[in-house]
Amino acid sequence: MTRVSYLIRESFVNMRRNLLVVVAAVLAVFVSLALALSALMVSELFRVNTLQWQEGTHVIVFLRDTRDGIGLEAHQSLLREILDFDAVEGAAYVDKAGAYEEFSEMFANTPSIIREIDPSVLPASIRIKLKDIKKYRDIEFRLAGDAAVRQIVAPGETIERLAKFSTAIDVGGLSLAIVQGVAAVVLISNTIRMAIYARREEVSIMKLVGASNWFIRIPFLIEGMLEGVLGAGMAVLTVTFLRRWVSSFDGDLDIFQLVISDDYFYRWSLLFLLFGALAGVVGSAIGLRRFLKD
């Protein structure tokens, strides 16, 4: 127990003697991991919203009405035809009353607009959910010439762009995490190298009196681990604050979700803390190789 307390105490002594260098290393780890963790959170937001859009209505078919010589029977016939399409998972008919109800909910905060709208001018529609969002162009092509169809609206192209952007962020976030992780290891390695160089005479004396290389290494390994954990902890706390701040705006955006699940966030936070500790130990081990060879 005495030996363990000595090793831990020596780690804090090393950190105090090289305080400025230690602070620089901790800040470097903090910046590196905060950027990497932020990139992962942004990537998750895009992934969640892409899935949310993909699971909603993929194609809206606005229909002609009696003013165009098209009646309810033509609407129902088209609905049955759409439901028979292999690419269609489900479809629902929304009549004029339903369209007006949706319109009223959408503009509930601006009643003046609602009062100016005649419910009869709002078209009925068929809302289509596809088995594969990429098939939306096939649906557009098959319905384009139908006499009952007034207009076809499909956000599929937007979803495709969002998915591609999300993939780019995934790759960028992973690349950033790797680069910043390597930078953290290198900086901690240099920090430990400077610390042991400043104490090279003391280390030489310890070796002369019989101290093993591992006995000398452990305080420096603990020091590196502490630097990595401190930097990672600061990164997690910062991103936690940013996550809460961003999620506070979630109610202001109807089409984009700004909330990340606790399970996802805490899992990655724990992994980043472990990575910080591992980066510190690996960096320390690399820094010690030059001075302590078995």
Image: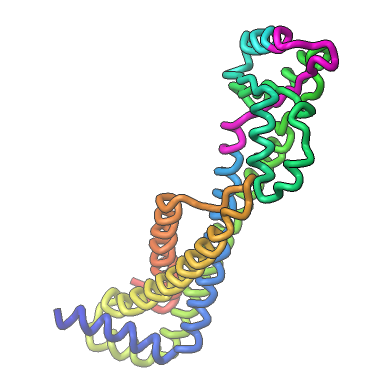
Q: Residue at x 64, y 19 (%)?
A: 93
Q: Nearer the viewer, residue 283 or 46?
A: 46
Q: Residue at x 70, y 25 (%)?
A: 96
Q: Which residues are magenta?
A: 51-75
In the rendered image, residue 83, in percent from the top left (x then y), is placed at 62, 12
Q: Nearer the viewer, residue 260 or 122?
A: 122
In the rendered image, residue 22, in percent from the top left (x then y), is placed at 46, 83
Q: Nearer the viewer, residue 87 or 97?
A: 97
In the image, residue 109 above or below residue 15:
above
Asked whether residue 264 is drawn in magenta, I would say no
Q: Residue at x 34, y 89 (%)?
A: 13
Q: Quadrant of the C terminus?
A: bottom left
Figure quadrant of residue 100: top right
In the image, residue 237 above or below residue 192:
above
In the image, residue 227 above or below residue 65:
below
In the figure, is residue 36 to the left or right of 284? right
Is residue 182 in view? no
In the image, residue 208 above or below residue 84:
below
In the rendered image, residue 228, in percent from the top left (x then y), is placed at 43, 71
In the rendered image, residue 51, in percent from the top left (x then y), is placed at 57, 37
Q: Residue at x 41, y 84 (%)?
A: 196
Q: Quadrant of the N terminus?
A: bottom left
Q: Residue furthest left?
A: 1
Q: Residue furthest front?
A: 115
In the figure, is residue 80 to the left or right of 198? right
In the figure, is residue 230 to the left or right of 12? right
